[in-house]
Image (cartoon, rainbow, N blue to C red):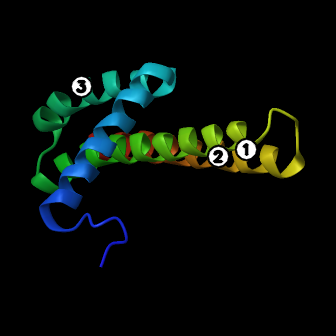
Amino acid sequence: MSKTGNTGLKRLRHAIIYSWQGFKMAFKYEEAFRQECLVLLIAIPLALWLGESSVEKILLIGSIVLLMIVELLNSAIEAVVDRISDDWHELSGRAKDMASAAVFLAFLNSVLTWFFILI
């Protein structure tokens, strides 16, 4: 049982509200996330038009969505690290660099997915 008393539909409602707040904050404060939203808006119709099968369409769209998921996690890690201290620390730098590397891998995954499906 939840310690907050939020179970069932109440918990789901709160989860949706918190998620929506996360989307709004990412869109407001993260330029990369805004750019990825634009890419997704372009990618969805392109994927539906260019993908030959349902699997190809899902892979094309999903690769962009995965990039956005990793970007959200990267932004969350950066926010927490920055909240802890403005001072430089090796572990803080390592955490931010690894999160950035994860975004790069997700980006590379998207590019390769689109390339190999569309060639």
Mark 3 → mark 2, Cα distance in angstroms: 24 Å
Mark 1 → mark 2, Cα distance in angstroms: 6 Å
Which quarter of the picture shows residue 25?
A: top left
| Label 2 sits on residue | 101
Q: Is residue 36 visible?
A: no
Q: Residue at x 64, y 44 (%)?
A: 80
Crowding near the residue tagged with mark 2, few <14, some 14–19, many ≥20 C-alpha atoms within 10 Å: some
| Label 1 sits on residue | 97
Circles 1, 2 touching at the beta carbon (< 8 Å): yes
- Quadrant where the image shows the N terminus: bottom left
Q: Please provide percent x and percent y for residue 14.
A: 25, 50
| Label 3 sits on residue | 41
Which amino acid type is shown beneath numbered disc 3? Leu
N-terminal of the pair, mark 1 or mark 3, is 3
Q: Please provide percent x and percent y for residue 70.
A: 48, 47
Q: Residue at x 35, y 40 (%)?
A: 64
Camera-near label (1 vs 2) is 1
